[in-house]
Structures are given as structure tokens and as C-alpha cells.
Amino acid sequence: MAEELHIQAKDKEGKYRELLPQIKALLDGEPDRIANMANVAAALKSAMCFFWVGFYLVKDEELVLGPFQGPVACTRISKGKGVCGTAWEKRNILIVEDVEKFPGHIACSTLSKSEIVVPLYNSQNEIIGVLDVDSDQLNAFDTVDAQYLENILQLL
């Protein structure tokens, strides 16, 4: 596949529907998980115009910054800390409408206003990381994002 995305839809779900097969084609045949995460982050940032998109990977009982697109980010997050650490600990997708109201939120950027974090599982159903997506708008994420981001992570 050419390294170019073609998104014509104007609505969120339409964008995801167009993006999903393009990400699948982009990842097809590439066995390197880090390379694939980098392309997923870039595709999501580009197609969906998110403020920040990236992965944190489980290493020695911490989440460590992995491939991302956007401003510089926090490097390490403990289990149960912030939105990412909480999603990891609870094994759930977390949608935060206003990060200022999330107890223990880790402010990597003051411009981030809302967030969604989706756990990434391996074939043994162990969490190996999380996908973290931030918006500079309040209440930017919903169940549509959760569904499609989870579908995208299943491609990894």
C-alpha cells in the first residue's frame, strides 16, 4: 500500500470506517510490532486530527513511552497512575471527558483536555501496552472511538 491515506468522510464514524481497511493494508506483511505501532499512531493523528496519539508499552511493571505522534510526552507511568496506568490496572478502555476532573491525571501537556486509553493485548490476553489518544477539546471521545480504536489494536 502507498504510504498515503485517503479519507473523504466528514463524520467521525465515517472516517474510522475509511481508515480501518487502510491501516489493515498498511500493516499487512509487516511483522515488526514497533514499526506497526508507529504507522498506526501516524495514521490516527493524520486522519482523525487528534492532538496526541501514542503507545505506552509494559516494561518491568511500568508503562514506557513507545511510538507516538504529537508534542513530547511523559516517559514512564506507574500502574494505577493517571489515565493510562488506570486503564492498564483495570484492564478497561477509559474515556475521560475532562482530564482536569480525573483524579491523579498526569498532565504531560496542559493543552490536553480529554483522553481515551485502550489496552493492547497479546495473544495470551496479557496487556502489553496501551494506546493513548488526547484531544485539545473537551469531551472529544465516545463509544465510537472506543469501538474503532479497539478494532484497530486487534490488527496489531
Image (spheres, rainbow, N blue to C red):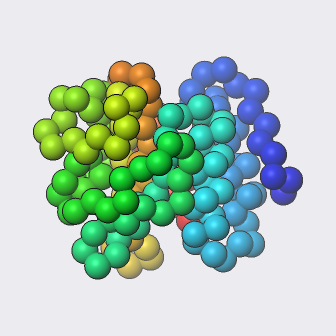
Rendered image quadrant of residue 111: top left
Q: Specify the quadrant of the image occupied by residue 121.
A: bottom left
Residue 131: image location, x then y, percent: 43, 53
The x, y position of residue 97, in whole percent, is 30, 27
Residue found 70% across the figure and 25% down from its top: 9
Q: Is residue 87 above or below residue 13?
A: below
Q: Residue at x 64, y 32 (%)?
A: 15
Q: Which quadrant: the N terminus?
A: bottom right
- Identify whether 81 is placed above or below 156: above
Residue at horizontal 53%, vertical 53%? Answer: 68
x, y percent for residue 144: 46, 34
Q: Is residue 90 visible?
A: no
Of residue 154 and residue 76, the one placed in the foreground of this image is: 76
Compared across the picture, whether 125 is left or right of 88 comes to right
Q: Assign the C terminus to one quadrant of the image.
A: bottom right
Q: Is residue 87 left or right of residue 25?
A: left
> Which residue is nearer to you in this view: 132 or 16?
132
Q: Is residue 151 left or right of residue 129?
A: right
